[in-house]
Image (tube, rainbow, N blue to C red):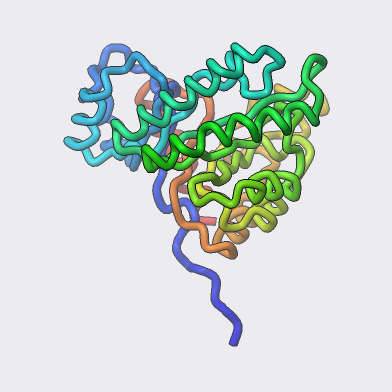
Amino acid sequence: MTATAPTSPPFARISLKWSMIETPELSIADTFAMLADLGYDGVEIDGPTDLPLMEVKAASAATGVALPGVINSRHWSHPLSSPDADIRAAGVQGMIEALETAETIGADTVLLVPGAVGPEVSYAAAWERAIAGLELLLPHAERTGVRIAIENVWNNFLLSPLEAAAFIDRFDHPLLGWYLDVGNILRNGYPTDWIEVLGERICRVDLKEYSRTKMDAEGPWKGFDVELGDGDCDWASVNAALRAIGYSGWASVEVPGGGRERLADIRARVEDLRSL
C-alpha cells in the first residue's frame, strides 16, 4: 500500500524576523499586538540581544505570538571557521549566549551559519573548524534543550544538499538540524533537490524569493530584489516536496520589511504561496 503524503500546509505557522519590523513608535507590547492582528504566528529575534527579554516574553504570552527561534547575531563577526583562535572562541561563546537566550524566551531553535570559505580560509579548514566548534556547542544545546539549525547561505561552504546531509550526519545528534533557506538556493540550484536529500533533517524553513533574470542582468545580489511570488521559485513544487517529507512546521519570512502596511502585504503574499 502506498503511503499518502501529509495534506496539511507545509507552512503551518508563519513567523518573521524582528529586524524586519520598522515601527519605532510602538512599544514591544504594541508591536506584538500588531503582529497578532496581521496574522503572524511568531517572530524570531537575534541573540545575544539588547532587547529586554522578559518584556518580549510577556508580550508573546499576552498576544499568542510565539517566539519559535533565535538567530545567532555573531556568526558573521566571529565565525567558527576563522583562522584566529580568539575569534573562533568568541564565536562559540556568542552561540552559547544565543542558546541561553532561546532557553530564556522559550524558543526551541537557534540559527547558525557554521563558517565561511574565503581567501584566508580553505574549504578543508572551514570543515574541520566548523566540526570542532559544533562539538563544543552541542553539550550546551543539550543543557538548554535548544536545537542548533545550520543555514545555507552564500558562504562558499556546504554548497550541495548531499554535502549538507553528510555534515549533519557526521554528528548524528537529535539537537542538530538544518534551517532551509529557499531563496538562497535559487542562485545555482533548486530547493526541491535540497528538500528531497535533507528530508527530516530540516527543522525550519526561511521564505525568500530570487530572480535569476535580475541576477543575470544586474548581478547576483540584485536577484533578491523581487517580491515573494514574483521570482523564479516554484512554490507549488516546494510545497509538494515539503509535504512529501512530512514537513508541516514553522516558516519564517526573511525579506525587506517595513511598517504595518508593508508587513500586511508580506503576510498576504505568504498566504498565497502556501495555498499553492
Name which residue lies at 70% across and 41% down: 232
Q: Is residue 4 visible?
A: yes
Q: Is residue 71 left or right of residue 261?
A: right
For the view shown, which residue lies furthest in the bottom direction? 1
Q: How many marks?
A: 0
Q: Is residue 251 above or below residue 104?
A: below
Name which residue lies at 25% across and 17% down: 26
Q: Nearer the viewer, residue 200 or 184?
A: 200
Question: Which corner quadrant of the image does residue 239 belong to?
Answer: bottom right
Name which residue lies at 36% across and 29% down: 100
Name which residue lies at 53% across and 40% down: 149
Q: Is residue 249 left or right of residue 60?
A: right
Q: Is residue 224 above or below residue 86?
A: below
x then y, percent, for residue 121? 77, 20
Quarter of the image where the C terminus is located: bottom right
Q: Is residue 262 visible?
A: no
x then y, percent, for residue 245? 58, 62
x then y, percent, for residue 134? 58, 34
x then y, percent, for residue 219? 78, 21
Question: Which corner quadrant of the image does residue 154 belong to?
Answer: top right
Question: Which corner quadrant of the image does residue 259 belong to?
Answer: top left
